Amino acid sequence: MKRIGYLVLSVTLVIVSCGQAQTAKTVAGTDTIAPAPVAVPGLTGPEMEHYTAITEHFFDPILAGRFNGSILVAKNGVILFERYKGFRNPLHRQDSITAHTAFHLASVSKTFTAMGTLKLWQEGKLDIHDPVSKYLTGFPYPTITIETLLNHRSGLHNYVHFMDKPGVDKRRYLDNGDVLKYIIDHPGSRDIFSGVANRHFEYSNTNFALLALIIEKVSGLPYPEFLARTFFEPIGMEDTYVYTRTDSGKSMASFYQTGRPFRLEFLDLVYGDKNVYSTVRDMYKWDQALRSGQLFSKGVLDSAYAGYSFEKPGQRNYGLGWRMLFIPNGKKLIYHNGWWHGNRTVFVRMLDEDATIIALSNNDYKNVYSAKRLCDLFGDYRQGHEGFDEGEPDPADSTGALGGEPAHAESAVVVHPVVHTGTHPHHHAVRRTVAHAPRKKVQKKKTSQAA
């Protein structure tokens, strides 16, 4: 416990500027992310009281509801709020959730896949501007580059749709190699590829399943081992891992709203787009390590946090593995949501304010996405509005878009930024609906989701 607190409280922070993509610069690798002394307190007493009181008030309605999960809010290296509610098995109320209970991150896993790819780019082991076919033998679309996989502009459609078709053997668990083989075996299929790369943004889990294969090809390591060696172990993320069949005994299941557990399905072993398990404390370590300046050069981080899709008006955009909102006042909100089966997750990073919001749940609790609204406690992100004017709706951000549950009382909580005056202020084949599918491909039946 002391080791975790020391690491969280003592990592030196570097505020990352969010400009246009730049050429990566190679930096010396490190075996561990070493903590550095903190020269002054992260927050004054009055600031700490202010932030904590408003955060507690904001999350009271969520914690009073059927939320089953964990929440952490931090600023300036100080944890302001940390709560754990519920059980590993909510139906039978068995095994309380603790700081070491790892949740399936769903699409928040993409942040690790993206930064793993960029780490290899920084080390000169690949070039993100290269065609995918240079690394994946037989890949039939030469115009698709690694960069267009990272920013969801590849034109590839979602594998959870095109592999949920007759002819795919759903009696066995498929993996990333099966996804690639299906693409290779069906060249020219419009169910798989739109026909033109880099024309527009289309969120697709296929992109990150392929990136995991590229990581394996370039590094010579299995994707789970690569992430462990590159990030989890050096950062001290002791409760974080990539799910494989050997983890079935320790991994926590996800649940329907009724409490019935989701069963393992034929696409549940595909990783890169999902399947990282972690805790709120470990995710905060991930946030702090990215800010530390020891993992990545400024050029690589600028590339990751730059917007690549401007063909539609609105605040919403996507970087290299990161969702983002461009706020009219010049701020940029970096975040990612997740949604797979009953797992719903939020990872929000305010780079200007060095503030972080993390919420993880596994009982299909849609209102967890409202956690992002707390960002106005630290900066003027909502511009006086109830929500965000983000253009095209993001189904994983809105209870209304997902259906099933009305918005709860947390939407009425108003937060205001602090004015600083001191120093630091089981096999089951189903047809599924996918959260970020193109609108024309909305399915009527649904039993599981991916975001």
Image: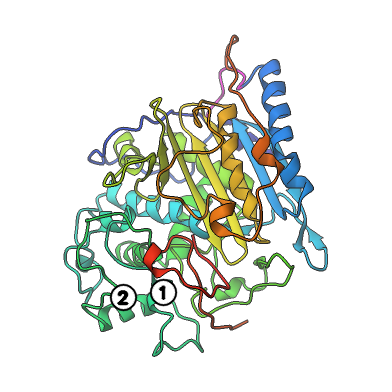
Q: Amino acid at mark 1?
A: His
Compared across the picture, whether 131 is left or right of 55 comes to left
Q: Image quadrant for the N terminus?
A: top right
Queried whether the magenta region covers residue 37, the answer comes back as yes
Residue at image location 60% in from the left, 71% down from the top: 247
Queried whether the magenta region covers residue 173, the answer comes back as no
Q: Can you tell which quarter of the image residue 213 is in? A: bottom left
Which residue is at the far right? 93
Q: Amino acid at mark 2?
A: Asp
Query: Distance from label 2 to label 1 (Cα)?
Result: 8 Å
Residue range (magenta): 36-42
Residue nearer the viewer, 135 or 373 = 373
Residue at image location 39% in from the left, 39% down from the top: 315
**Badge 2: few (under 14), some or many (20 or more) residues near its Cα, within 10 Å?**
some
**Badge 1: few (under 14), some or many (20 or more) residues near its Cα, within 10 Å?**
some
Residue 119 visible in the displayed image: yes
Compared across the picture, whether 13 is left or right of 311 comes to right
Compared across the picture, whether 348 is left or right of 360 comes to left
Res 161 label: 1
Q: Which element carries disc 1, helix, strand or loop?
A: helix
Residue nearer the viewer, 269 or 156 = 156
Q: Please report contact status of discs 2 and 1: CB closer than 8 Å, yes or no.
A: yes
Residue nearer the viewer, 154 or 354 = 154
Res 432 label: none
Comes first in the chain, label 2 or label 1: 1
Could you tell me what secondary structure mostly forms the magenta stretch? loop
Q: What residue did someone put label 2 on?
A: 191
Residue 138 location, x and y as percent?
21, 77
Colour style of the rendered protein structure: rainbow
